Image: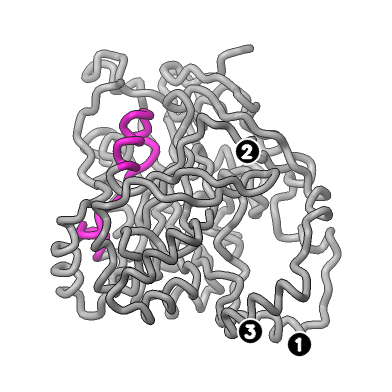
C-alpha cells in the first residue's frame, strides 16, 4: 500500500466517543439536530456492519454495509484513503460546520430552493474547506501543494441560478416539499442529469494536461441533519458508498441506461400509497399539494434545464458484483466523481431492534419514521503529482481516476468512462485495452 505523508485525523469514532460528542455538542448554543439524540451512537461499538438493501440497476440487493470501525478498516484495506474520510462526530471542525448549517438552513438553503452556488453560503464552504484540509492534507492543504476550490463549476458565474454547489435533501414524504430527495439510484455525480454549461470540463479542471498537469478530485462533504441512531448511523436511507476497485486503477462493471428506459419504471399503486400514508399521515402532503398543480411537462420540457448531453450519453448503471465493498457514515467526505453512491434501505428487523432497544422507544420510532434529511457541500481539490516525486520517491502520489480518464481522452461531456476501464494512475492516463 502507498505510504502516507500524514496520518488521517478524521475517523469513524468508537463507543468511547459518545461522551466527547455530547460534551462538544453541549458547548454549542443550539445543539444540531444530527447530534440531538441522547442515545445516538451509544451502541456504536456493537456494530461494524449493518444489513441493507443496495439499489442496483436490476433491483435492490441485500448486502453488508460496513459501519464505524468496520468501515474504517475497509477504507485502509482497499487503499481508499484518498477517496473517502469518515468524520468523527466529536470533531470540533465538524460541529462548527453543523452549527453553521443549522443557522443558515432556512435563511440560505430553503430560500435558495434547497440548492445553489457556493457564493450564497461562504461561511459554510470555508468551514467545509477546513475539514477537507484536515482529512486530505496532500490533496487540499497548501502546505503540501494542495488547493481547495469551492463548488463543482458545472456553470460559470453568469449562470449561478443553475448551480448545485450545495444541496439540501429531504424525503419525498416530508411535509416541506423538495425536488432533491435521497437518491435511491447508484450513480457518480458527473454522469447525473444536472445541468452543465458547454465547456465546463475545461473551465472546472484547467491546466490538467501535460506532464506537469493537475490531478483533480471532486469532494462532497456529506452531513446528516436528522438524528443518528444508537448504532451511530442515520435511522433511514443511509448514503452507501462503494469503495474503489484496485485502489482506483480499474472501473467497476456497468451498463448504460438511456432516459427512455425510465418509461418502464413501475409507479406506486393506490393501495401501496394508502398503506404508506396510514403509517405516516404527513407523507400525504406532497400528494395533496401536487393536486393543486395542473401544469404537466413533456419529456422535452423536463430536460430543458438539465445536461444537454444526457439524452445522448445516458447514465451508467452499476452491475451487482460480489466483490463490491459498501460503507456508510452520517458525516463523511468522499470523492463523488469516482465513488458510486446512493441511498440504501436498512434491514427492517435490525432497525426495529434498535428502536425497541432504546430507553425512549416513542422518540426512537418517531425519528426512525421521519426519513433522512441531509446536506451536501461540493468542492474541487487539486494538486500536481509531478511536484511530489522529490519528496515521495516518485511512487507515493498518484492522479485521481477521474483526471486519468480526462487526461487520457476517456472522459468527455458526451461520453461515459468505459466500463472496467484501466488507468495508469502514476502517469495519469488511460491504459489501452
Label 3: few (<14), some (14–19) or many (≥20) C-alpha neighbours in 10 Å: some
The foreground one among 40 and 250 is 40
Q: Position of residue 413 (x, y in %)?
A: 67, 38
Above or below for 396 versus 356: above
Q: Position of residue 229 (x, y in %)?
A: 35, 65
Circle 3 SS class: helix
**Residue hosting label 3:** 285
Q: Residue at x 33, y 44 (%)?
A: 85
Can residue 389 be seen here?
Answer: yes
- CB within 8 Å, label 1 to label 2: no
Q: Start and end of the magenta stretch?
A: 70-95
Q: Position of residue 122 (x, y in %)?
A: 37, 64
Label drawn at residue 292: 1
Label drawn at residue 71: none
Query: Does label 3 or label 1 sit earlier along the sequence?
Result: 3
Q: Where does the N terminus fall, quadrant-wise?
A: top left
Alpha carbon distance from label 3 to label 1: 11 Å
Q: How many marks?
A: 3
Label drawn at residue 318: 2
Alpha carbon distance from label 1 to label 2: 37 Å
Q: Residue at x 78, y 59 (%)?
A: 266
**Is 330 a magenta residue?**
no
Q: Residue at x 59, y 73 (%)?
A: 178
Query: Does label 1 or label 2 sit earlier along the sequence?
Result: 1
**Splitting the image into 4 quarters, where does residue 104 fall?**
bottom left
The foreground one among 180 and 324 is 324
Amino acid at each position: 500500500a502507498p505510504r502516507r505523508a500524514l496520518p488521517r485525523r478524521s475517523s469513524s469514532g468508537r463507543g468511547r466517543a459518545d461522551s466527547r460528542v455530547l460534551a462538544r455538542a453541549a458547548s454549542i448554543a443550539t445543539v444540531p439536530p444530527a447530534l440531538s439524540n441522547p442515545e445516538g451512537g451509544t451502541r456504536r461499538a456493537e456494530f461494524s456492519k449493518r444489513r441493507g438493501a443496495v439499489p442496483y440497476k436490476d433491483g435492490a440487493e441485500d448486502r453488508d454495509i460496513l459501519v464505524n470501525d468496520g468501515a474504517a478498516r475497509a477504507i485502509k484495506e482497499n487503499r481508499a484513503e484518498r477517496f473517502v474520510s469518515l468524520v468523527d462526530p466529536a470533531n470540533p471542525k465538524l460541529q462548527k460546520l453543523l452549527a453553521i448549517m443549522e443557522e443558515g438552513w432556512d435563511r440560505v438553503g430553503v430560500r435558495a430552493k434547497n440548492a445553489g452556488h457556493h457564493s450564497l453560503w461562504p461561511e459554510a464552504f470555508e468551514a467545509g474547506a477546513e475539514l477537507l484540509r484536515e482529512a486530505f492534507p496532500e490533496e487540499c492543504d497548501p502546505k503540501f501543494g494542495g488547493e481547495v476550490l469551492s463548488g463543482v463549476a458545472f456553470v460559470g458565474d453568469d449562470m449561478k441560478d443553475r448551480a448545485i454547489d450545495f444541496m439540501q435533501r429531504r424525503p419525498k414524504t416530508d411535509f416541506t416539499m423538495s425536488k432533491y430527495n435521497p437518491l435511491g439510484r447508484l450513480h457518480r455525480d458527473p454522469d447525473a442529469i444536472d445541468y452543465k454549461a458547454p465547456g465546463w470540463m475545461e473551465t472546472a479542471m484547467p491546466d490538467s494536461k501535460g506532464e506537469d498537469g493537475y490531478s483533480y478530485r471532486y469532494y462532497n462533504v456529506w452531513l446528516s441533519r436528522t438524528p443518528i441512531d444508537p448504532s451511530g448511523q442515520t435511522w433511514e436511507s443511509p448514503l452507501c458508498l462503494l469503495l474503489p476497485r484496485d485502489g482506483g486503477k480499474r472501473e467497476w462493471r456497468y451498463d448504460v441506461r438511456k432516459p427512455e428506459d425510465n418509461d418502464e419504471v413501475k409507479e406506486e399503486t393506490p393501495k401501496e400509497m394508502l398503506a404508506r400514508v396510514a403509517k405516516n399521515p404527513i407523507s400525504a402532503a406532497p400528494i395533496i399539494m401536487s393536486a393543486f398543480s395542473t401544469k404537466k411537462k413533456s419529456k422535452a420540457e423536463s430536460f430543458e434545464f438539465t445536461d444537454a448531453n444526457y439524452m445522448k450519453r445516458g447514465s451508467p448503471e452499476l452491475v451487482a458484483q460480489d466483490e463490491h465493498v459498501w460503507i456508510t457514515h452520517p458525516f463523511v467526505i468522499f470523492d463523488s466523481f469516482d465513488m458510486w453512491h446512493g441511498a440504501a434501505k436498512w434491514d427492517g428487523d435490525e432497525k426495529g431492534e434498535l428502536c425497541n432497544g432504546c430507553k425512549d422507544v416513542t422518540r426512537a420510532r418517531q425519528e426512525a419514521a421521519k426519513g433522512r434529511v441531509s446536506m451536501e457541500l461540493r468542492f474541487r481539490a487539486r494538486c500536481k503529482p509531478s511536484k511530489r516525486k522529490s519528496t515521495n520517491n516518485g511512487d507515493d502520489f498518484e492522479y485521481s481516476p477521474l483526471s486519468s480518464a480526462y487526461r487520457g481522452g476517456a472522459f468527455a461531456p458526451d461520453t461515459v468512462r468505459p466500463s472496467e476501464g484501466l488507468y495508469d494512475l502514476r502517469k495519469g492516463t488511460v491504459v489501452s485495452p
